[in-house]
């Protein structure tokens, strides 16, 4: 799949109506109690840096699949996404349609090679893989720096989204919502590392899937089936149900390109390949993950379509803003218990994503960057915990800043990972003609182009034509630079691959 | 099809499709806006790029070169995506209150949602699972990597030479040197 763009979180999820009713508070409190319980258990099992960052390669298939679904979906799938469908019609589906191919594509392109490299070299991070593939601490270092930029954006937007949801459930104020959410996420990240994250992800992913399916079934029942829902929409706004909705074909297809090809560079999902206990269990991983994602994304489609139809038929009041689609449906139409489940599901989605990025960010700071500078830290586990705390605090502080600043930081997270990692990692692990210089040039291109275009657009110094985004341009340029520089330096290709890495690339 | 050819074709498809996508984006910067063919470049370039990178990832080396029976699902998904996008571009916009519905959606939307969004969802992961041992990973592969990891540097180079004795993509794979940046 498609993980969901963090930028949309902040853009479309800047506020939620208060849902602080006894049932919602009770379900929310039960949710947090379970998260804390899992974290205490995981902390007791975490003893080494490998436990902390890759769960000692000891996660089973079902747990890893559910966890991967959980981190692939942020609060955007529950709030911003349905709002986007309500606003622009079926064109918004092009963000999630790539889920039909991305999981199995990731399995073919990356899973086997990363898992076997992990086996051969005890790798812990994605920059690790780039470093050993190209025999280059410099490539590992620049990949790590690029990822840090993306993580700052993701963390800030998820911290803000967490604050918004917790404030909506408990009515504690946005600032306290951010600190409470980050505090709990930090507690389990710093104590139990990825093990706590994985098992909390399992719980959170299950909650998200259950909530999504129940809401989807409710919408179908309330609307009299999908045909009746479509008829209501067609009577009021036929273009909504065109294949591109209100987007241009170029814009919709561009979404598909960035969210399909870009999925191969999303570290929160790709990193999971290291953790599977038995590599042969990869056999069923794409099928299970794809089915899980379909379940979680039913709400995205169902609520977007349903609310549009209900408003068109006069069964719901018109929305003040598109991002009110899910909250309005939950608070005014569905049973309150269902609303409580979904609000907890949104909290789960944001916490799951935040935890994953805290862990990846900590690994970069205490593992990849020291390697790039030719030094190794002595106690990686202790340093990992310290850095985890610092990253979480930095994210919470950043999230307290203005909404537009946080939105800006979040916008380029997905695109930055895609443009900096996809060519060097996904193509590089499968093409022995790729060179160290090509990888470094490609990562640098992705980083510089994404930052330059996003900053220019944020400062209104530049605007893109309809259908073109900074993420798409940066991804395409990064590919072209990767191929061109690898071709120009092709005489060095053979020398940049270690024998064991070459073996993994041949299998 | 031999290993080198499969990988070269996949890489060629990926490069051509990325160039097509780049041209489509570049055309959008024209003062008059993107031409009609820009959307077509994406509609055909995206399936080709995804198909190309999947083949590149799935192709094995050694004696069992290429993608074997996987060429069928790879071709199928590339065609399904291209047909889905192309169908949505080609068919006239006739959505209206009286539109005939296919499984609850107007025709063009149904092609995209069910064709692009659901058909590969089932087909590809099942193809992956059914061909996993023959095309993707088997216990001997893992043992070979583990043995390599256990062995010394000299032994590693020997095994690598055995496993990868052919020229691949123009690179002589048996001549790795120790030059780290």
Image: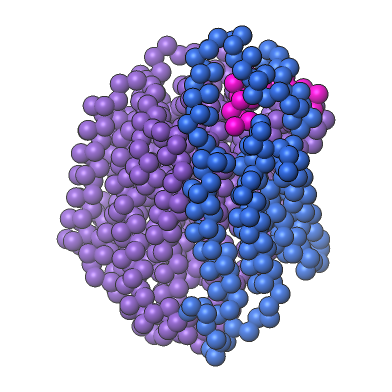
Q: Residue A106: percent from the left, percent from the top? A: 55, 44
Residue found 81% across the figure and 24% down from its top: A491
- Residue A479, compared with residue B49, is above or below; it is above
Region in magenta: A490-507
Q: Quadrant of residue A466?
A: bottom right
Among the chains pictured, the one given purple colouring is A
Residue A405 visible in the picture: no
Q: Which of A184 and A47 is in front in this view?
A: A47
Residue B104 visible in the picture: yes
Can you name the residue that lies furthest to the front here? B63
Q: Residue A416: percent from the left, percent from the top? A: 59, 42
Instruction: Give the overall secondary structure of the magenta segment.
Output: helix
Is residue A503 highlighted in magenta? Answer: yes
Residue found 34% across the figure and 42% down from its top: A63
Q: Residue A44: percent from the left, percent from the top? A: 23, 26
Is residue A319 highlighted in magenta? Answer: no
Q: In this view, does A351 lie to the left or right of A469?
A: left
- Residue B19, compared with residue A367, is above or below; it is below
Can you name the residue that lies furthest to the bottom here? B98
Q: Is residue A208 left or right of residue B28?
A: left
Q: Which of A312 and A101 is in front in this view?
A: A101
Q: Quadrant of residue A240?
A: bottom right
Position of the C terminus of chain A, as image quadrant, is: top right
Residue found 20% across the figure and 44% down from its top: A33
Q: Residue A418: percent from the left, percent from the top? A: 60, 43
Q: Is residue A22 left or right of residue A12?
A: left
Among the chains pictured, the one given blue colouring is B
């Amino acid at each position: 799949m498609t993980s969901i763009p963090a930028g949309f979180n902040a853009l479309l999820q800047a506020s939620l109506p208060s849902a602080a009713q006894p049932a919602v508070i009770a379900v929310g409190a039960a949710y947090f109690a379970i998260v804390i319980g899992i974290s205490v258990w995981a902390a007791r099992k975490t003893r080494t840096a490998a436990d902390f960052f890759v769960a000692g390669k000891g996660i089973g298939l079902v747990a890893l699949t559910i966890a991967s679904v959980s981190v692939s979906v942020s609060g955007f799938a529950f709030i911003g996404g349905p709002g986007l469908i309500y606003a622009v019609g079926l064109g918004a589906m092009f963000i999630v349609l790539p889920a039909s191919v991305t999981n199995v594509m990731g399995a073919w392109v990356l899973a086997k090679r990363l898992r076997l490299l992990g086996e051969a070299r005890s790798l812990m991070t994605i920059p690790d893989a780039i470093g050993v593939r190209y025999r280059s601490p410099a490539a590992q270092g620049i990949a790590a720096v690029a990822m840090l930029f993306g993580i700052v954006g993701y963390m800030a937007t998820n911290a803000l989204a967490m604050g918004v949801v917790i404030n909506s459930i408990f009515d504690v104020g946005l600032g306290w919502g951010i600190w409470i959410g980050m505090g709990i996420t930090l507690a389990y990240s710093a104590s139990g590392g990825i093990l706590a994250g994985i098992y909390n992800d399992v719980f959170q992913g299950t909650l998200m899937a259950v909530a999504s399916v129940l809401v989807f079934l409710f919408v179908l029942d309330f609307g009299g089936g999908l045909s009746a829902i479509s008829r209501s929409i067609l009577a009021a706004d036929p273009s909504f149900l065109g294949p591109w909705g209100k987007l241009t074909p170029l814009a919709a297809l561009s979404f598909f390109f960035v969210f399909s090809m870009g999925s191969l560079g999303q570290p929160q999902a790709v990193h999971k390949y290291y953790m599977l206990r038995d590599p042969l269990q990869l056999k069923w991983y794409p099928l299970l993950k794809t089915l899980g994602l379909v379940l979680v994304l039913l709400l995205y489609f169902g609520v977007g379509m349903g609310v549009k139809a209900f408003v068109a038929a006069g069964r719901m009041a018109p929305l003040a803003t598109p991002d009110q689609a899910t909250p309005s449906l939950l608070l005014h139409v569905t049973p309150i218990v269902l609303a409580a489940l979904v609000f907890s599901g949104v909290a789960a989605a944001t916490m799951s994503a935040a935890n994953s990025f805290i862990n990846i960010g900590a690994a970069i700071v205490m593992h990849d960057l020291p390697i790039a500078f030719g030094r190794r830290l002595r106690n990686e586990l202790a340093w990992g915990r310290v850095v985890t705390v610092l990253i979480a605090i930095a994210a919470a502080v950043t999230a307290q800043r203005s909404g537009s600043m946080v939105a800006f930081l979040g916008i380029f997270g997905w695109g930055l990972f895609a443009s900096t990692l996809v060519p060097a990692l996904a193509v590089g692990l499968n093409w022995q003609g790729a060179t160290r210089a090509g990888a470094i040039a490609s990562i640098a291109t992705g980083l510089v182009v994404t930052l330059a275009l996003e900053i220019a657009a944020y400062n209104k110094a530049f605007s893109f034509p309809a259908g073109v985004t900074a993420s798409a341009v940066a991804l395409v340029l990064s590919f072209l630079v990767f191929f061109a520089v690898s071709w120009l330096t092709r005489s060095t290709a053979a020398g940049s691959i270690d024998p064991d890495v070459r073996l993994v690339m041949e299998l | 099809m031999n290993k080198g050819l499969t990988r070269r074709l996949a890489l060629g498809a990926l490069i051509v499709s990325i160039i097509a996508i780049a041209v489509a984006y570049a055309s959008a910067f024209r003062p008059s806006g993107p031409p009609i063919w820009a959307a077509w470049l994406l509609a055909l370039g995206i399936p080709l790029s995804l198909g190309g990178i999947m083949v590149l990832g799935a192709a094995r080396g050694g004696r069992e070169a290429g993608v074997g029976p996987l060429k069928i699902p790879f071709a199928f998904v590339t065609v399904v995506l291209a047909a889905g996008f192309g169908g949505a571009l080609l068919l006239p916009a006739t959505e209206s209150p009286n539109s005939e519905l296919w499984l609850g959606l107007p025709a063009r939307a149904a092609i995209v949602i069910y064709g692009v969004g659901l058909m590969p969802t089932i087909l590809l992961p099942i193809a992956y699972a059914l061909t996993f041992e023959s095309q993707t990973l088997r216990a001997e592969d893992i043992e070979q990597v583990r043995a390599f990891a256990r062995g010394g540097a000299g032994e590693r180079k020997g095994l690598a030479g055995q496993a990868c004795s052919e020229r691949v993509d123009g690179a002589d794979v048996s001549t790795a040197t120790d030059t780290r940046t």
